[in-house]
Image (cartoon, rainbow, N blue to C red):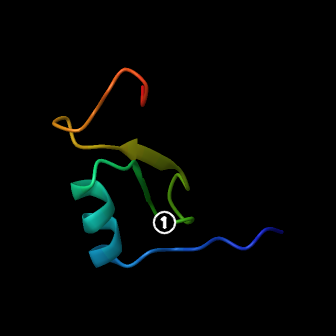
Amino acid sequence: MKEIKLNTIEEAIEDFREGEFVIVVDDEDRENEGDFIISAEKITPEKV
């Protein structure tokens, strides 16, 4: 199985501030899914 890299909260906040997508995942004992989030102020048609 491929290794998954998890970022720190500080890294995720910095990426979010820079207009990058951040994937927020829940626990694997729950739905084990992720949501792509991005700052509305930084979204562009190209990113969508």
Camera-nearest residue between 2 and 21: 21
Query: Which quarter of the rendering shows the N terminus?
Result: bottom right
- Considering every residue shown, the one lying at the far right of the view is 1
Residue at x 43% of width, y 45% of height: 35
Against 9, residue 47 (above or below) is above
Q: Residues within 10 Å of mark 1 (few under 14, many from 20)?
A: few
- Quarter residue 24 falls in: bottom left
> How far across and down, in percent of the image, does residue 11 sit?
34, 73
- Considering every residue shown, the one lying at the far top of the view is 45
Camera-nearest residue between 8 and 26: 8
Residue at x 21% of width, y 56% of height: 17
Local SS, label 1: loop
Query: Which quarter of the rendering shows the C terminus?
Result: top left
In the rendered view, does 19 fall on the left or right side of 3?
Answer: left
Camera-nearest residue between 31 and 10: 10
> How far across and down, in percent of the image, does residue 8 sit?
37, 79
Against 23, residue 5 (above or below) is below
- Considering every residue shown, the one lying at the far left of the view is 41
- Quarter residue 37 falls in: top left
> How far across and down, in percent of the image, does residue 32 sit?
55, 56
In the rendered structure, which amino acid carries the disc numbered 1?
A: Asp
Against 9, residue 23 (above or below) is above
Pointer 1 residue? 27
Residue at x 49% of width, y 50% of height: 34
In the rendered view, does 46 fall on the left or right side of 42?
Answer: right
- Quarter residue 41 falls in: top left
Number of labels in the image equals 1
Residue at x 65% of width, y 70% of height: 4
